[in-house]
Image: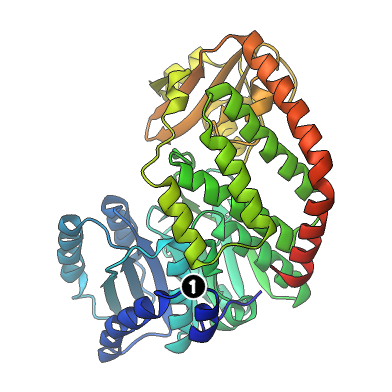
């Protein structure tokens, strides 16, 4: 689905402040026209991540290919931003590269930011675009030269994400042509944040098949990106992630698998409600499903939900678990007999930590999961010991060890499954209809 940022459409959706943001940024971008631009641009977003973005830029400026840097600071801390600005000025003697550093006066959040700047890149006549997150580092010299040499014959080029052995995620390290962008459309700004990349990936996959887009998947070129970072540590992040995942699934992947994922998410929230004894999870279940069913995800709704959950941290989980930072070697030795429930990060964990992946072997003894917000969290509670890997930072691993008695967790899992099953029987006709409408009309 192609999302055009037309002022009238935005007004009808209730996105009233967007025009003010759009015009304000337009004034900033006019300064870019004073420089002669290349036809290739590296698009980087930053929010209070200056140390990592400096590492990224150091790696990229070594490339001999001519391209522009468009670095957008999403209203970061002013003191750190000014230091970073001085760092960029010191690089401007590289006359074959243009640096455009723009600081936004409002935090536009992820989906808004990408949608706006993708529109501008179309307007300014760039031919080739690469999206790079501020904490991604290419592992080979002249990675951009290699990728661009392939873009002459393809519409998109994807390289390998080293830690997971998957191909590049759309916001990580992703080359594409402007014609490809026009075919696929910009990121849906109504997603606000969380799962906007998931929806965009599903959309690209669908359109890639329909329009026979020429894609190149490169196996011997890699980038690195932090795999495990604490996620969903605020309730508003949980709400947006839940709602947006449902919308993305219904638009592009209407299947039995989608309904299974839906069941797992309902089960997850009932387990967390009973296990962590926090009534706010009922509110998350209710609002995310109501907003999904009635297609309520415009600017006004997003802002209202943000205010409802703002400044509320998911700290209650630490009352029922013990949080530790362990060196990698100590973790390997201490938990080498544990088994990992499958997840996106399984490849990294199996390779780096030598953890075996298994669904049921020793499930009633011990297991490891990634994040206490994972859909397989309810299944993990059937184990007598549960270790959740929350972060991997350099050589240290942050884990949470669940302390509650196994029999209590077992009862919670069984009882919540029963509640979910009964609720699901009533909801499934409505959900199937909503999924069908979402798939047919891209709601």
In percent of width and height, residue 39 lies at 43, 85
Specify the quadrant that holds the C terminus.
bottom right
In percent of width and height, residue 319 lies at 43, 19
Specify the quadrant of the image occupied by residue 350.
Answer: top right
Specify the quadrant of the image occupied by residue 264.
Answer: top right
Its colouring scheme is: rainbow
Q: Is mark 1 on a helix, strand or loop?
A: helix
**Label 1: which residue?**
115
**Residue at horizontal 75 percent and vertical 72 percent from the top:** 441
The answer, for residue 295, to whether it is visible in the render is yes
Say if 8 sits above or below 154 in the image. Answer: below
- The answer to whether 299 appears left or right of 340 in the picture is left
Say if 416 sits above or below 44 in the image. Answer: above
Say if 86 sits above or below 409 in the image. Answer: below
**Residue at horizontal 76 percent and vertical 49 percent from the top:** 258
Specify the quadrant of the image occupied by residue 195.
Answer: bottom right
In percent of width and height, residue 214 lies at 69, 75
């Amino acid at each position: 689905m192609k999302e055009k940022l037309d002022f009238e459409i935005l007004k009808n959706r209730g996105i009233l402040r967007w025009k003010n943001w759009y015009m304000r940024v337009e004034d900033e971008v006019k300064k870019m026209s004073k420089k002669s631009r290349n036809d290739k641009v590296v698009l980087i977003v930053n929010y209070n991540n200056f140390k990592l973005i400096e590492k990224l830029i150091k790696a990229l400026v070594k490339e001999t290919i001519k391209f522009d840097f468009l670095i957008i600071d999403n209203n970061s801390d002013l003191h750190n931003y000014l230091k970073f600005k001085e760092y960029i000025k010191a690089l401007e003697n590289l006359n074959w590269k243009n640096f455009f550093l723009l600081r936004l006066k409002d935090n536009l959040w992820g989906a808004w930011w990408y949608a706006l700047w993708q529109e501008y890149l179309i307007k300014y006549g760039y031919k080739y675009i690469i999206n790079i997150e501020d904490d991604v580092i290419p592992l080979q010299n002249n990675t951009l030269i290699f990728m661009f040499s392939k873009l002459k014959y393809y519409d998109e080029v994807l390289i390998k994400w080293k830690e997971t052995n998957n191909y590049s995620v759309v916001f990580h390290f992703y080359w594409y042509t402007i014609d490809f962008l026009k075919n696929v459309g910009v990121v849906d700004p109504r997603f606000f944040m969380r799962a906007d990349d998931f929806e965009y990936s599903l959309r690209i996959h669908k359109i890639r098949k329909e329009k026979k887009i020429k894609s190149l998947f490169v196996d011997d070129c890699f980038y690195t990106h932090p795999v495990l970072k604490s996620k969903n540590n605020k309730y508003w992040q949980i709400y947006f992630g839940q709602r947006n995942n449902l919308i993305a699934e219904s638009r592009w992947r209407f299947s039995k698998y989608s309904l299974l994922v839906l069941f797992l998410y309902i089960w997850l929230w009932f387990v967390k409600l009973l296990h962590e004894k926090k009534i706010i999870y009922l509110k998350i279940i209710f609002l995310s499903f109501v907003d999904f069913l009635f297609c309520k995800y415009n600017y006004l709704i997003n802002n209202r939900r943000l205010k409802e959950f703002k400044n509320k941290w998911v700290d209650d989980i630490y009352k029922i678990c013990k949080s530790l930072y362990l060196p990698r070697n100590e973790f390997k030795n201490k938990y080498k007999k544990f088994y990992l429930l499958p997840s996106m990060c399984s490849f990294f964990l199996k390779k780096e930590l030598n953890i075996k992946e298994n669904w049921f072997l020793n499930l009633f003894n011990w297991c490891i999961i990634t994040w206490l917000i994972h859909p397989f969290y309810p299944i993990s509670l059937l184990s007598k010991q549960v270790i959740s890997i929350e972060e991997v930072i350099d050589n240290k691993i942050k884990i949470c060890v669940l302390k509650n008695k196994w029999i209590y967790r077992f009862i919670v899992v069984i009882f919540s499954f029963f509640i979910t099953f009964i609720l699901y029987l009533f909801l499934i006709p409505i959900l199937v209809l909503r999924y069908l409408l979402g798939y047919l009309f891209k709601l």
